[in-house]
Image: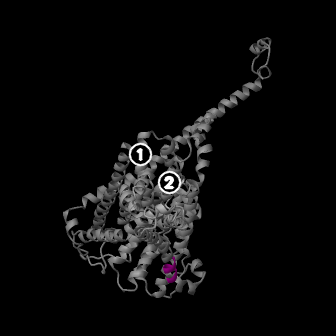
Amino acid sequence: MTEPAIAPAESTSGRGPGGAGPASTSLGGSSTADRIYNGVITLFALCVPLLLLGLFFEVGAAGWPALKKFGVGFLFSSNWDPVREQFGVAPAIVGTLATSIVALIIATPLALGVAIYIAEFAPTWLRTPIAFLVDLLAAIPSVVYGLWGIFVLVPIMRSTVMPFLRDTLHLGATPFFAGPAYGPSVLTAGVILAIMALPYISSVSREVLLAVPRTQREAALALGATRWEAIQGAVLPYARTGIIGGIILGLGRALGETMAVTMVIGNRHDLSASLFAPGYSIASLIANEFTEASGDLHLSALMAAGFVLFVITLIVNAIARWLVWQMAGGQRSVA
Amino acid sequence: MSDLAMPPASSEIPPVQTLRPTTRQRATAARTLATVRRRRAVNVVMVGLLVLSAILTTLPLVLILGHLLKSGFSSLNWAFFTQLPKPVGETGGGMANAIVGTLILVGLGSLIGLPIGVGAGLYLVERSGTKLATTVRFLADVLNGLPSIVLAIFAWNLLVRSVGHFSALAGGVALGAMMVPMVTRTTEEMVRLVPAALREAALALGYSRARTSLTIVLRTATAGIVTGALVAIARVAGETAPLLFTAFGNQFASTALDRPIAALPLQIYTYAVSPYDDWHAQAWAGALVLIVLVLAISLLARAATRSRFDARGGE
């Protein structure tokens, strides 16, 4: 009696090897075709972890000679001298972190603002167009951002933004905004990265905000809260985990971005506190020097730098994904 | 109950009518009013800031696209699509080889990335809930966020170092590796949307599980999977970093897979960082062509999804 009722339920779950009972042998999941099919898709699925493992070990092994030679000093030395074969990536690591932090400081409030606007305030007819425009920012290739950066943003930074920050706002007194305004700089790279990270932070935040139950807002409004208070007190706390995940995801993008940064950061191996100074990021270091590497150790040092970047972004992404999953319940992918 | 909650006697109402608010009550009322005004003001200011951030966010897009159209169109001509790059000092020339190269590289990447991605995505639905599926899903998301320059190092070690020269194949592998995790996740999402009843109906008719998946489930999800594939193609078509030291670029027309090959993003980069005005103009033209290509693919992807949703809504 119960047999026919159970069998379809089991077959849709996609599990239950051998099917349910003798009648299902010709229909269930054990024919030759099924076994081949299962084998093939399992093989394809295995490609994903294999790819990640392959990346990890190959890039790690390629960078090993440099890592072994310079040890921890590789991370903390700022001496990068291909002629004497001395390599330290501290300026590039600092540059990578500095550009990404500048990017997040600029992008986070804007991305959150536009996400909240779309999710809570925008009239229905305006929602899709604005979301589309913001998402379009993610579709622009990074080399186009770089091109725009070189010919439009850098001159604006040099002639207007940097003098304004340094002289008009008197921020030049702090070490962060001191020195001559060349144009290509850590700050300029940070601004470009902010524009590039914006759509990622914004789209994750938007999805997460839209997933907040209506009752959460309505309860706050019913208690007499203004709309902003409802968002601040009831909606944002509910969506906090997911939003933080989105921000860290944007951080991951910013850390690994190569072309646009290479084109506007100035590419100099100097450690400077000023955001106005030209710098280097790990990705731009690799992009610039890889094809012109002078020897095996130089090449190995570049790949070791790549490995450092790989590990940093791996950790950042794992944290971000975990946070977003916590929020979204493990099945949905956002961004 | 009710007589406990309600104060009795209407005789106590008259004193209330004659009561005047005390100074303390007046002060409280004034404070409450001030608080309400302040809260309303904060509300207005915050909503204003939200609108401002929406405007500021769309501003860079308008600026970039505007400048791109202005500078790109003025240097775009027919020769750009038909001629090879000219050496420094000679004006004119085009990026025909780079356009062909990009198509070849993206084709190679798709050949590698699409089957693996779609297969892995199918696995994630068919074996949903198993330990391997959860791991693969998580790792695909993590892979998605990895810097593309790391993939270039990977492809270089795998295919350039051993052979001794750059090749289109290495570039294709780097792009394909980028596509795998993207396609995996979108395929999974799209296949998951196929109603369980369809699958059950096929199984009940005696279809094997493989046949159900391939002819019923996969076919129903085709539009969605195509969308995912197009989005992935649009993204890798504009990538430069994975090609820097794999495909490397080529000033001449080459379609050989074991030789360096030109690509549009690479060419734009080379020209943009060069000191020649003529090359800058070519870079803008190239950027315009590239973005039109990428946006066209993205819009195509959107159109595919929309028609699918319309079909679903009509049912």
Location of residue B79 by image quarter: bottom left
Specify whether B81 is left or right of A230. left
Render colour scheme: one colour
Q: Would residue A67 be visible to someone looking at this image?
A: yes
Q: Would you call the spot at circle 1 few (<14 residues within 10 Å), some (14-19), or many (20 or more)?
A: few
Q: Is residue A83 above or below residue B272?
A: below
Principal SS element in the magenta part? helix
Q: Which residue is mark 1?
A: A128
The amino acid type found where label 1 is placed reads Thr
Q: Would you call the spot at circle 2 few (<14 residues within 10 Å), some (14-19), or many (20 or more)?
A: few
Query: Does the stretch in magenta take in A59?
Result: yes
x, y percentage for residue B11? 80, 11
Name the element at disc 2.
Answer: helix
Q: Mark 1, chain letter? A: A
- Residue stretch in magenta: A56-61
x, y percentage for residue A224? 62, 34
- Circle count: 2
Name the element at disc 1.
Answer: helix
B283, A314: nearer the viewer: A314
